[in-house]
Image (cartoon, grey):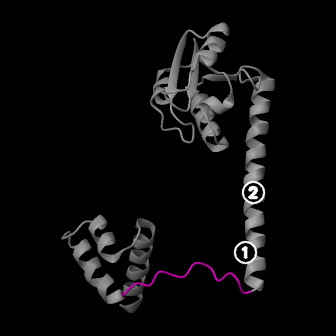
Amino acid sequence: MLVGYARVSTEEQNEARQIKALQEQGAEKIFTDKRSGKNIDRKALKEMLDYVREGDTVITESISRIARSTRDLLSIIDLLNHKKVNFISIKERIDTTTPQGKFMLTVFAAMAELERENILQRQKEGIEIAKEQGKYKGKPPIRVDYKAFAAIYTRWKGNEITAVQAMKSLGLKPNTFYRRVKEYEQKREADI
């Protein structure tokens, strides 16, 4: 089955042009979102992803209609591949039912990965230069009063409070809280 997906960013925008293009390509069922493509938390997109079955093909007017970021696009394509569903983008002429289409999608993915690596490399180089100039000192460590932490930890381990309550009491985010728990437990073990 050829399943279409159309998206416009707001209620005021009209998706008629996209729907016409999908119908001209033979889409038998079309899912439409009137929501920004900045993330993949869209009702019709989720419904379409749940709806498609092995052997189906998802068709969209352009890649930007299904996803605005390469990461989201690749995540959606990965999900479709896992379900053995093909993907066609009319504008970019990507058709994963063909070897050339699969290749082009791989090229898009490789380019995205390369760009991400380049960004990280430039960031690292910039930080090194800033450190040499004394302008970058890094993120200051979060100071924790270990007496207060020990009291909260004991209450948490004794099931008097939840982890969320413990984090709130200490003013810590989950990652920092659990890292401090690990450090605290290692310190206690070393002291024994």
Task: Tell me the chief SS of the magenta region.
Answer: loop
Q: Is residue 33 visible?
A: yes
Q: Amino acid at mark 1?
A: Ile
Rendered image quadrant of residue 6? top right
Residue highlighted by disc 1: 127
Side (left or right) of 175 relative to 58: left
Q: Residue furthest front?
A: 12
Dot 2 falls on a residue whose secondary structure is helix
Q: Amino acid at mark 2?
A: Glu
Q: Which residues are drawn in magenta?
A: 134-145
Q: What residue lies at 78% left-to-right and 71% top-to-bottom?
A: 125
The image position of residue 177, as x and y in percent, is 40, 72
Q: What residue lies at 36% left-to-right and 74% top-to-bottom?
A: 171
Dot 1 falls on a residue whose secondary structure is helix
Residue highlighted by disc 2: 117
Q: Residue furthest bottom?
A: 191
Q: Compared with residue 76, is residue 187 higher up or lower down, i.e. above or below?
A: below
The image position of residue 35, as x and y in percent, is 51, 33
Quadrant showing the N terminus? top right
Q: Is residue 52 magenta?
A: no
Q: What residue lies at 72% left-to-right and 87% top-to-bottom?
A: 134
The image position of residue 62, as x and y in percent, is 68, 26
Q: Is residue 55 visible?
A: no
> Counting other residues with Cα less than 10 Å from the Cα at mark 2, is it few (<14), some (14-19), or many (20 or more)?
few
Quadrant showing the C terminus? bottom left
Among numbered discs 2 and 1, the one appearing first in the sequence: 2
Q: What residue lies at 57% left-to-right and 20% top-to-bottom?
A: 15
Q: Is residue 140 magenta?
A: yes
